[in-house]
Image (cartoon, helix red, strand yellow):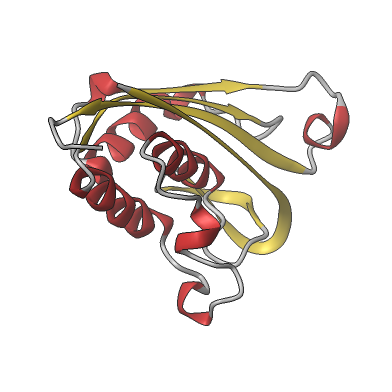
Amino acid sequence: MRIGFGYDSHRFEEGRRLVLGGVEFPGETGLKGHSDADVLIHAIIDALLGAAALGDIGSHFPDDDPAWKDADSAQLLTEVVREVRGAGWTIANIDATVICESPKLRPCIELLRERLASVMGVGKGRISVKGKTNEGMDDVGSGKGIEVHAVALLDDLGAVK
C-alpha cells in the first residue's frame, strides 16, 4: 500500500464559475486558475500521483500549456486514475478537507462524494470530503480563496514496482 498527500489553493476571481469536485456551485464566485480551477480535484490528483510516485499535477498538465486552458478537471482526474491503475495500483480511499469560509459545503458533501466516486470509478464509501473554515484567520479565513488537503491510499494490484 502507498499513501500520497495533495494540496492546492486558489484565490477567488470574479467572472468565473465555481467548480469543486466536479460540481458547479451556481451563484458563487469562481476561482482563478488556468483550468477550471477545481481546487478539490487538483489536490486529489496530486495525492494520487504522489502515492503512485508519478510526479505531480504540474508535470502532467502544465499551467503554461494552452491545451489545458479552461480544462475540465474531472477529465484530468479520469486520466490520472487511468495512469495510476496502469501503474498497478487501485484506489483504496481518498480523504479530502476543503477549507473555505464560503460556500458552506455541508449541504453538498454527499453530492461531492458521489461525483468524485463516479469520476474515479470507485464506490462512494471510498471517498471522504469534509468542509472546514479557518475561523477568520489568514487569506482563506478572510474569504479570499479556498485550499484543500487530500490524502490517497493506494493498494497494490500485484504489479512489480
Say which quadrant the C terminus sits in.
top left
Image quarter of residue 100: top right
Say which quadrant the N terminus sits in.
top left
Question: Relative to residue 15, is residue 41 depicted above or below?
Answer: above
Q: Horizontal and vertical percent for residue 46?
A: 49, 43
Residue at 84 percent of width and 24 percent of height: 136
Q: Residue furthest toward the bottom?
A: 66
Question: Relative to residue 17, is residue 119 depicted above or below?
Answer: above
Q: Residue furthest toward the left?
A: 158
113 with respect to 161 (left or right): right
Tag count: 0
Question: Relative to residue 134, is residue 71 depicted above or below?
Answer: below
Near-viewer residue (99 or 4): 4
Q: Horizontal and vertical percent for residue 142?
A: 85, 33
Q: Horizontal and vertical percent for residue 71?
A: 45, 67
Residue at 53 percent of width and 28 percent of height: 105
Residue at 50 percent of width and 29 percent of height: 150
Near-viewer residue (30 or 92): 92
101 with respect to 118 (left or right): right
Near-viewer residue (144 or 91): 91
Image quarter of residue 125: top left
Near-viewer residue (72 or 52): 52
Q: Horizontal and vertical percent for residue 155?
A: 24, 25
Image quarter of residue 121: top left
Residue at 50 percent of width and 47 percent of height: 42
